[in-house]
Image (cartoon, grey):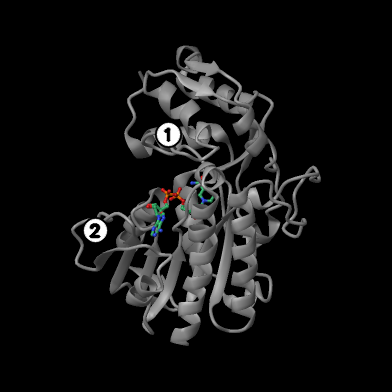
Amino acid sequence: MKILITGGAGFLGQRLARELLARGSLKDAQGAPQAITELVLLDVVRANDFGDSRVRTEVGDIAERSVLERVIDGNTAAIFHLAAVVSGQAEADFDLGMRINLDASRLLLDVCRQRGHRPRVVFTSSVAVYGGDLPEVVQNDTALNPQSSYGAQKAIAELLLNDYSRRGFVDGRVLRLPTISVRPGRPNAAASSFASGIIREPLNGEEAVCPVSGSTRLWLLSPRKAIECLIAGLELDAAALSNQRVLNLPGISVSVDGMVAALREVAGEEVAKRIVWQPDARVEKIVGSWPGRWDTSRAEQLGLRGEQSFADVIRGYIADEGIQIR
Ligand SMILES: NC(=O)c1ccc[n+]([C@@H]2O[C@H](COP(=O)([O-])OP(=O)(O)OC[C@H]3O[C@@H](n4cnc5c(N)ncnc54)[C@H](O)[C@@H]3O)[C@@H](O)[C@H]2O)c1
């Protein structure tokens, strides 16, 4: 089976690639496991190929049709479309966000349509599609009312994926990811970057700035579970999805105070005291518009799973990254 990951050099793209290579196979549209013979990683920077002969790395701009035509052919059975510019960047640079998050998504679907073989496509959407006056618990079908350009771009791409699926051009699956935490490495331009920073930096012996109040509620999922959900989402039986292609992934609803309490529980008071509270109105406005609680029963009925507690997420991060608490 030939698989494409767009954004293959990114945080989730690299982890997904590593997991797919380790598994070695993926279920086809009929549910039968097929060996992964080729894994194409497209990104603007060269992805790590893990020294694996099944991996082909391609450097190119996903907003260019010729690049997509180079990486999608009639044998591309599965596409994980992850390439995007993150929320803070899409808000700062309107044209860039529209070009990569929206125009390139339509282009990708259109190249699939042109190829004519109806590949399965997983698209990673976000909590940012919701906003405004929200119910206490957001349902799968709560009206979309994004309060950022990133959220608007993701919402439009969701609709496109639904329609290209309805028309039989692709077999699409939209997975709305909670904020991923704990993300290793350095902070990024996402408005939610602090959701990892306030755990990662203190564990590493450094101070971390928290730009939102402790009562801010977040919807979180670990990288490990996110990758499991991406693969399970691709393998879902199309008949079970019917004409509703969008799933809110299971995550943990936790306040920032609750995250700090979990950090204290796992790593102790000295570590938790390294968080510095410095409200930032720009970040509070974006993150505060996102829902903190979702109804994820549909995804769960289909077998997708998240963690039970944020303390478990922190323990998983420490184990996966081999962190020595300082
Ligand atoms: N990490 C999260 O908390 C989170 C939450 C919700 C949704 N998502 C979505 O999941 C997906 C993956 O997120 P991530 O955390 O791995 O982000 P990331 O920024 O690490 O990865 C995105 C990748 O896309 C690539 N890219 C950007 N512009 C490109 C272009 N023009 N052509 C080709 N590649 C390009 C980047 O170089 C990067 O490697 C994104 O669609 C993101 O919107 C992530």
Q: For the residue carrying disc 2, how many other residues have a C-alpha within 10 Å: few (<14), some (14-19), or many (20+)?
A: some
| Circle 1 residue | 187
Where residue 249 appears, as percent x and y from the top left, is 60, 54
Where 222 falls versus 217 (above or below)? below
Q: Residues within 10 Å of mark 1 (few under 14, many from 20)?
A: some
Disc number placed over residue 288 in the picture, else none? none
- CB contact under 8 Å: marks 1 and 2: no
Left or right: 181, with 147 as reference point: left
Disc 2, ligand 1: is the CB inside 8 Å? no
Count of marks placed on residues: 2
Circle nearer the viewer, 1 or 2: 1
Q: What x and y, as percent, mark residue 71?
A: 34, 73
Position of the N terminus, as image quadrant, is bottom left
Q: Which residue is drawn at 31% across and 59% down?
A: 22
- Regarding residue 30, the answer to whether it shows in the image is no
Q: Position of residue 45 (x, y in %)?
A: 30, 54
Q: What residue type is labelled 1?
A: Pro
State the residue position of label 2.
Answer: 49
Above or below residue 109? Residue 249 is: above
Front-most of residues 192 and 297: 192
Q: In this view, does 145 lie above or below 324?
A: below
Residue at x 64% of width, y 59% of height: 155
For the point 47% across and 39% down, the residue is 189
Query: Which residue is rendered at x = 41% and y = 73% of the image?
Result: 65
Badge 1 element: loop
